[in-house]
Image: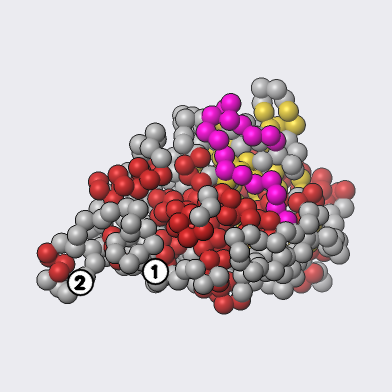
Amino acid sequence: MTWSHNHFRNVTETVEPQYRTAARSNIGKAAMPLSRRTLLQGSLLCAAGMACAPSPALTQEPAELPTPDQRKQMAGLAADFMKAYDVPGLSIAIAIKGRPAYDEAFGVADRETGEALTPQHRFRIASISKPVTSTGIFTLVEAGKLRLGDYVFGSNSILGKDYPTTPTPQSLMSTGASRSYVEQITIEHLLTHTTGTWGNQFRDPMFMNQDMKHRELINWTLEHMPLTNPPGETYAYSNFGYCVLGRVIEKLTGQSYEQYIKNNVLKRCGVADMQIAGNTLSDRATNEVKYYSQTGGDPYRMNVARMDSHGGWIATPGDLTTLFVHIDGFKDTEQLLTDDSLRTMSTPSTANPRYAKGLFITANNNWWHSGLLDGTTTISVRTNGDFCWSAFTNTRSRDAGMSRALDQLVWQMTKAVPDWHPQKRA
């Protein structure tokens, strides 16, 4: 049986790329990494007065683990990938039916010191932060604190008192519209990247005005980059939109974005070590890798902390695999969200049938997200069958094909273990 893979559109920006995917063959759910330490951590009740049942930690082993020979074959595939793209360190975690199956790291966390990479090392995950934020938004929907149709700016909105907007233009009033285009933006528009502007292809607000804090940047963007078309009609992958979603979470909960996600998403599935990244090398966290860019950019001259809700988390591949296992829609583990919420979260917009709400979607219902920053290339996947996995590296290659190759690598590594694919055996 031949496996097909996501097809990536080449990009050269220093921001998260848009990906177009082709449907994979029906091979089962894509695997995302779980660290054994993370999986054995106890679940904690969520905070902020929300009644949320904790999800049990993953403690069972799959029926078959890779044999020594199979692990050697998988390591060979990893070595070939690292050589091809000059990768210092590569970390991969795979889960099958919600249980840990493979958790391995290759290469170094720091080239200068020779520090060996381990599964416990943390990476900037870049735009895989978006499904984390989306999950947080849906916990608020389930708690009755938010609706996807709620307005974000303007009168009778979530952030209207914090961010003043221009009055409805006369040209719109003459058509009967009571709200300007920016005042028509809803939570769903932000989740699906359908505000129609603020994209990452040209003049991404999140990579401008690096010294501004969130409030200053949002006010500046509303003033200097107004919407010229009504939201909901076109897709434009927007880091800024997810930045605004972080501020929505803060407004509705009275907590920082980071603390809310830790209390109400991560702790519920036993993830304790994720945090928002620092910006400089001196801000490097415990067990965080060192980043290497091949594209001329400097990984330590970005305001990564300001990217919090669209690209600011650091995590192990095991952390993200654990999270995906708890939002994969299957019953192998207790889910963080209801079936209705997960169906809504994984339903794409009419503007882009390949992007839902914090997740890219293939035609045969695989879910995934990638991340790309100077010094970082990442991917997390949930397939439509048995697998969840994550694969992180501490470099960004000058070859734009690296993101696609990282995706293909893990699909190929799972083929090394025939028992993971019993339908393929004679």
| Figure quadrant of residue 178 | bottom left
Q: What amino acid is at disc 1?
A: Asp
Q: Residue at x 11, y 71 (%)?
A: 174
Q: Residue furthest bottom?
A: 340
Where does the image place residue 84, in percent across and percent down from the top left? 62, 38
What number is the disc on residue 273?
none
What number is the disc on residue 150?
1
Q: Which residue is mark 2?
A: 177
| Predominant SS of the magenta segment | loop
Q: Residue furthest top?
A: 112
- Give the CA distance from mark 1 to mark 2: 17 Å
Q: What amino acid is at disc 2?
A: Ala
Where does the image place residue 127, in percent across and percent down from the top left? 52, 50
Point out the image quarter for the N terminus: bottom right
Instruction: Name the residue nearer the viewer: 25 or 287.
Output: 287
Q: Residue at x 66, y 22 (%)?
A: 112
Decide: is 212 above or below 58. Answer: above
Span colored in magenta: 269-287
Point out the image quarter for the C terminus: bottom right
Labels 1 & 2 near each other (Cβ < 8 A): no
Asked which secondary structure carries label 2, the reply is loop
Decide: is 280 above or below 309. Answer: above
Residue 273 in the magenta stretch? The answer is yes
Q: Is residue 6 left or right of residue 302?
A: right
| Figure quadrant of residue 280 | top right
Circle 1 residues within 10 Å: few <14, some 14–19, many ≥20: some
Q: Residue at x 15, y 73 (%)?
A: 175
